[in-house]
Image (spheres, coloured by chain):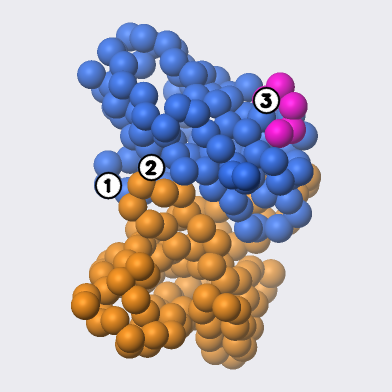
Chain colours: A blue, B orange
Amino acid sequence: DTAVSQTPKYLVTQMGNDKSIKCEQNLGHDTMYWYKQDSKKFLKIMFSYNNKELIINETVPNRFSPKSPDKAHLNLHINSLELGDSAVYFCASSQDAPIQYFGAGTRLSVL
Amino acid sequence: LAKTTQPISMDSYEGQEVNITCSHNNIATNDYITWYQQFPSQGPRFIIQGYKTKVTNEVASLFIPADRKSSTLSLPRVSLSDTAVYYCLVGLIPPPRFVYKIIFGKGTRLHILP
């Protein structure tokens, strides 16, 4: 069983579209995160939720909206996609320790 | 959060021991040192974490001198499959609700040659 799973693995879409990425963890962790890794391979945190509550919200355009229906799921919805949104998006989770477990990533390509 | 400096890239050969050093001159008293590994097309994977002296697990060893201003990740007898990017992270934000904000640097791209 994959501990942190993201879907889809690849996402190709046109500018201006709205898309969602889903994340689920079966580790029983209370905290989940979204990271963005750009073409230069810098990995930056975007959001973090703890028990469905938004805790970290970095400087991210408000076209990005995370949603956590329960503590095992953290989805990322992106409105009006732009070329600069092309990146790999990683979901992660943690529990009471600065050790995070990452998903395999979703490669988003905006054309 | 303490800033870290590590080599951008390193090459080594199969069977060798590889040591990657990370500088963190501004490390705070409560900071831990954590290393992650990232293979191409995968998410980062936790390798090892330490506070001082030496920590060893089944994957690697972490050496931390007394002043804690640097740390060295040691990978014994590397293989081709150890080719990856290795990130050194320093910091531990006292969690209001156990949320840890990890800042990833540029990492060290390790290339193992046959």
Q: CA distance from mark 3 to mark 2?
A: 21 Å
x then y, percent, for residue A76:
53, 24
Badge 2 amino acid: Gln
Residue at 61% of width from left, 88% of height from top? B53
x then y, percent, for residue B87:
43, 63
Indicate left or right for B16 with A99 as reference: left
Density class for disc 3 (Cα within 10 Å; few <14, some 14-19, many ≥20) is many
Badge 1 amino acid: Lys
Q: A82 or B59: which is nearer to us?
A: B59
Badge 3 amino acid: Ser
**Which of the two discs, 3 and 2, labels the residue nearer the N terminus?**
2
Q: Nearer the viewer, mark 1 or mark 3?
A: 3
**Which of the two discs, 1 and 3, labels the residue nearer the N terminus?**
1
Indicate left or right for A19 with A28 as reference: left
Indicate left or right for A81 with A1 as reference: left
Density class for disc 2 (Cα within 10 Å; few <14, some 14-19, many ≥20) is some
Q: What number is the disc on residue A37?
A: 2
| Chain letter of disc 3 in the image | A
